[in-house]
Amino acid sequence: MGLYFDHTLETLAPDQRKDYFQRKIRETVVYAYRHSPFVKKHLDHAGIDPNSIKGPEDLPSIPVIKKEQVREAHRLCPPFGEILAVPPEELGRIYMSPGPIYDPEHKEEKRLKEAKALFGAGLRPGDRVVVTFSFHLVPAGLLFDTALREMAATVVPSGVGNTELQATLLKDLHVTGYIGTASFLLNLLGRCKELGYVFGKDIVLKRAVLTGEKVPDSMRESFERDYGLETGQVYGTADLGLFAYECGEHKGMHVCEEVFLEIVEPKSGIPVAPGEVGEIVVTYFDKTLPMVRYGTGDLSFMETGPCPCGGTSPRLGGIVGRVGDSFKVRGMFIHEPQVRQAAEKVQGVHKAILVIERINNRDHLTFKVELEEGPVDKKSVREDLERNFRDLCRLKTDDVQFYKKGTFGKGEKSLSDERKWE
């Protein structure tokens, strides 16, 4: 494989890259219109003839598909919101993301773009890699599993939590690679120290691929300085998989050629100038779940200038925020309507606000709850609220605080992100 997983695509000359995307965009829009009822309705509603889309310059005429539209489509036409473009019997797996949104995976899916991303971020054939994301319902764990085996690495499917057991796995199995959040890696390395494991002898971890949350520069420097780890970040979504990765130069994240990525003004959907911040919008060249101008809700910008690694793909800058009412916490999205839904089901709750903070390099979730007047069983409120939220978002809260009715201001949102990043 050398320096690249797919040398031909990753090093396309400018004219070749332009021709490639013109062809792929043209084919994808027509295919999606013919096979995905959701995309057909979207284009028809906008008065767009799919044959009029000849390449990247024509895409802005198509309105951006918002996450809220996808959630609503799943609600009205379960289980796939009429987005699926192949017969259901061709599916190999079906995942569930918060919403609920059901994410289909074809029987023949090889996760090649994900393998490309992991290779670009530093993992190699022969690596023994712990995957610390969930293998239950959500696509993350099995997505990484398939991609790693495609690139001839060995998978240790450790899943989430239990740092002592995972530290033992690192030592006993001579694990060389890690995939997960930066905060969990920090906790895991700390547990290795507590157990007396010697880095470079008992622990031979060399490479870490980080995703699911923002990585402060100070934390990355600690990984590389204190533990000798090579680190790389990857980016994607549950429905589209991974489609951007950071090479060893750390000059932004290369965009995989299996998608066409735009940075747009969130309200108008008009592309912004290189270097300006906007929403990440993706057209996905896929036969199972083709998407045309899908808004991820994440804010970023495009890096300018060539990458020293020699790859010629466009590069995303860091994720600098979110559009609207959704935030990523410990690798999972939380949507404000889910917070309201969790609280509405609990007797005795007048209003609840979920506050996201960053404490000791970990996302910390606190429910601040206004109680109804009169006697209220706080223990039951706490248990019911925590259970409802865990069922909806598959995340555990850290604290529940109670307040008198009328404490919160009018119009205050149910979800507040108060994290501060170094």
Image: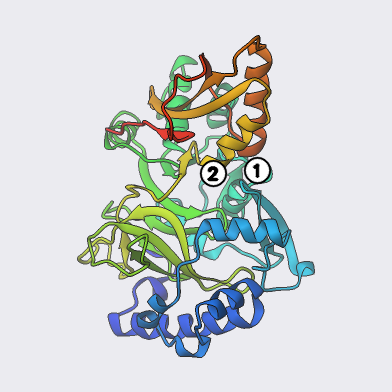
Can I make out residue 359 in this image? yes
Q: How many marks?
A: 2
Label number found at residue 215: none
Nearest the eye: 56 or 18 = 56
Disc 1 versus disc 2: nearer the observer? 1
Nearest the eye: 22 or 170 = 22
Residue at figure coordinates x 31%, y 62% from the top left: 315
Judged from this view, the residue extending furthest toward the bottom is: 51
Amino acid type of the residue tagged 1 in the rendering: Phe
Mark 2 = which residue?
Answer: 128
Mark 1 = which residue?
Answer: 135
Residue 100 locus on image (x, y percent): 65, 49
Q: Quadrant of the N terminus?
A: bottom left
Looking at the image, residue 161 sits to the left or right of residue 271; the answer is: right
- Tell me, what colour scheme is on the image? rainbow
Q: Quadrant of the C terminus?
A: top left
Nearest the eye: 190 or 205 = 190
Amino acid type of the residue tagged 2 in the rendering: Arg
Q: Quadrant of residue 327?
A: top left
Residue 183 locus on image (x, y percent): 43, 31
Nearest the eye: 95 or 311 = 95
Q: Quadrant of residue 256?
A: bottom left
Residue at figure coordinates x 58%, y 24% from the top left: 350
Looking at the image, residue 224 sits to the left or right of residue 97; the answer is: left
Against 161, residue 370 (above or below) is: above
- Tell me the CA gap for discs 1 and 2: 18 Å
SS for callout 1: loop
SS for callout 2: strand
Sequence order check, earlier mark of 1 and 2: 2
Can I make out residue 158 in this image? no
Against 231, residue 389 (above or below) is: above
